[in-house]
Image (tube, rainbow, N blue to C red):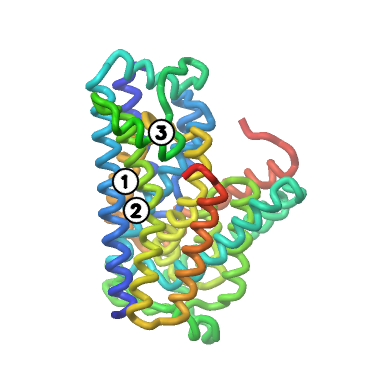
Amino acid sequence: MTPLVFLAALFATSVMAGATGAILGLGGGILLIPILTLFYGVDLRYAMGASIVSVIATSSGAAAAYLRTSLSNIRIGLFLTLATVSGALVGAGLAGHVPVRALQLLLGLALGYSAFTTLRQLHVEIPQSLEADTLALRFSLDGTYYDAPLDRQVKYRAARVRQGFAAMFGAGLLSGLLGIGSGAFKVLAMDYFMRLPMKVSTATSNFMIGVTSAATASVYFAHGDIHPLLATPVAIGVLAGAMLGTRLMARLRNTTVRKAFLPVLAYLAASMILHGLGIELP
Amino acid sequence: MTSWAVERAVARVLFWGGLFSVSLMLMGLCAYAARDQPHAWEGLRTVQNRQAGGDVDIFTTLADVRRGLRQRPLEGLALATLGLLGLLATPIAGVAVALVCFGRQRDRPYVVISALLLAMLLVSLALAGGV
């Protein structure tokens, strides 16, 4: 592959990863790392460094647009990021002292169960509101956004805040222990536990992943794992893709976003269970 | 100031911070390629195999970046790395702006949440040690 073709292919891949990440609330690492290593022969550490940069670029591009349109909820984002970052700090401290495989297996099974329940509520456009949660009232964890496909303002309020906060802490813990991103877990906690509309969940996750990844990225930078020749085309492509993704998301229904999210959830569950059983994927 | 106003202020920081940082990265990459094209292509090969060549400088500290920026002709990769650091700092700046906005609103719970989050992020950066 000539350098120019390599750069063009890298840019196209990054645009795709950015658009997907913006819609699904993921950093894009789940797509980028396997593609960069398997198809482009990129060194794994550089691929991981580029992936963490892509998370922040996706977040900057997508969260800015989602915050402007109130699809991303800053209060919910900050409240839950507090749990994730605390979990990540504790996880980083515990690394090497906890049975990671058992944890992965447990989490994989929990994700598998969540994928099953998500499948059952695949056609739920706006979740039915449960009784008012005291923490949601205390911290104003509610909002309104204009839903273009439904052509109306959608009001929502977070439910089961304690469970959502605990799930976010768990996601952060895992992030700190295993050094993985946790965008999918954030979306799941907001969609499944807190009963937020799917689009609000993915849009708010986009804001959160940027904040949580900023601290992690400095570790990669200090270790020399962020190669500017790789990170630059990836960041440009991902930023462009994220902006494209936000435009697409405005036209999508919550059910469509949930349908697109389900395979990611299933893949993550399978991957976690296999890792937990000691079976390495190629 | 309403929640909407805070969201607008943070959105502006994320958008312009991201765009400005990525522009610096692009300018740095162009400067690097323009300076010595065969060398630049060789540098790209190291991306695919870390052991393939050690002649591409990867800056890992702010002091290295500063040194690269002072060089004449300009070290393109130092400029790209400066943009990269700007990108990493953008979400943290977003939280700082949220803290200021909530402070102006006298929204005490969110001042505490934003301040705690900012403190934890800064601790994480300090623990990372590189920046």
Mark pair 1, 2: CA separation: 7 Å
Residue B14 figure quarter: bottom left
The answer to whether one can see residue A193 in this image is: yes
Q: Chain of mark 3?
A: B
In the rendered image, residue A94, in percent from the top left (x then y), is placed at 70, 52
Residue A253 figure quarter: bottom left
In the rendered image, residue A281, in percent from the top left (x then y), is placed at 63, 34
Which residue, given by chain and number where applicable, does mark 2 sit on? A60
Observer-side mark, 2 or 3, equals 3
When the figure is inspected, residue A133 is found, relative to residue A192, above or below; the finding is below
SS for callout 3: helix
* Residue visible at 39% across and 31% down in the picture: A230
Q: Which mark is residue A193?
A: none
Q: Which mark is residue B64?
A: 3
The answer to whether one can see residue A101 in this image is: no
SS for callout 1: helix
Mark pair 2, 3: CA separation: 26 Å
